[in-house]
Structures are given as C-alpha cells and as structure tokens.
Image (spheres, rainbow, N blue to C red):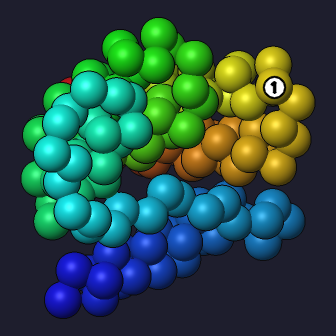
Amino acid sequence: MRVAVVGAIAASLSLGARSALGSSQAPFNPPSYEQNPIPSDLDTAEDWETVGRDAAAVGDYHNAVFAFNKAIDLALGNDPELFELRGWTQYLQQDYDAAIADLAAAVDLYRQRERHEDYHNAQQMRDYVVTRQSQQQLSGNPFHR
C-alpha cells in the first residue's frame, strides 16, 4: 500500500512538474519516501532521516519535518539531501516559503560539492515550488501561508 501511495504521489508530482515547467525544461525527480525499520537508537542524522522518510511515506508531514530537523542538526547543516527532503515535505504541507528556503539551501550545498545533476534537480524543484506559490497567490487560495 505505501509503495503504491508513494508511487502515485511521485507520478502526480512529476506530471505536475512537467506542466508547470513547460515542455522546454526537463522534469525534476522529487524525493521518494519509503518506509524502513526504525533504528533502535536515534543517534545519527541517518537514523533521523529514516524516521522522516517513514513519516512522509504515510503522509505524516509534521513529524517528517520534525525528524528532518533533527537530522539536519546532527549533520551540522552540511547534507544537501536532508534540506531537499525537508523542503519537499514542506511543499507537500503547502508551506511554500520554508520549502523554497530549504530547496535553495540544497541547491547551494549541491553546487559547493559540484554535484551538478543533484544541483539541477534541486533547482528545478525550487523553481517549481516558486511557480506553485505564485499560482496559489494568484488564485487566492486560503491555504497559502
């Protein structure tokens, strides 16, 4: 069930990315959230990342963000993938400003590490969220923060 849910979310987001970005830009790949066994000790950034992915996989975005916060703290803010995960989760919560800030941080960290493919993917994700935020503002969506 959870894999189907994650797959459906990823597919709909990818399709949305294509239409939002237009046909001239390649679609991005949002992070995947799959459940794994919870680590017995929550001492590392990787442990908390697992908790965050598990929570996001079942749609518990509030606790996913909490877990990604812990992971980022333990990684001393040096892991771009954690910012990407938290940013996309915040987007799913419709917290666009926080999502944009996190995705921008991921972009900067990927650029510093010269991880070009990851950099471009995170940049496209950030641009997509900026576009969605603008669309929500124009439509007067009451859920926009």
Q: Which residue corresponds to the image point at 39% horizontal and 38% vertical from the top-left?
A: 46
Q: How crowded is mark 1: few (under 14 residues within 10 Å), some or many (20 or more)?
A: few
Of helix, strand and loop, which one carries label 1?
loop
Q: Which residue corresponds to the image point at 52% horizontal and 59% vertical from the top-left?
A: 30
Q: Which of 48 and 103 is in front in this view?
A: 48
The quarter of the image holding the N terminus is: bottom left
Q: Residue 128 placed where, x, y %?
A: 57, 48
Q: Nearer the viewer, residue 38 or 63?
A: 38
Q: Mark 1 points at which residue?
A: 113
Q: Residue 6 placed where, x, y %?
A: 33, 75
Q: Nearer the viewer, residue 43 or 89?
A: 43
Left or right for 63, reference 92 = left
Q: Which of 111 and 141 is in front in this view?
A: 111
Query: In the rendered image, which quarter is residue 103 located in?
Result: top right
Q: Residue 76 placed where, x, y %?
A: 47, 10
Q: Which residue corresponds to the image point at 18% horizontal and 36% vertical from the top-left?
A: 41
Residue 144 appears in the rendering: no
> In the figure, 96 relative to 59: above or below?
above
Left or right for 26, reference 28 = right
> In the figure, 63 relative to 27: above or below?
above
Q: Residue 57 placed where, x, y %?
A: 24, 64
Query: In the rendered image, which quarter is residue 63 located in?
Result: top left
Q: Which residue corresponds to the image point at 33% horizontal and 68% vertical from the top-left?
A: 34
Residue 60 appears in the rendering: yes
Which amino acid, by three-letter code, is at mark 1?
Arg
Left or right for 49, reference 127 = left
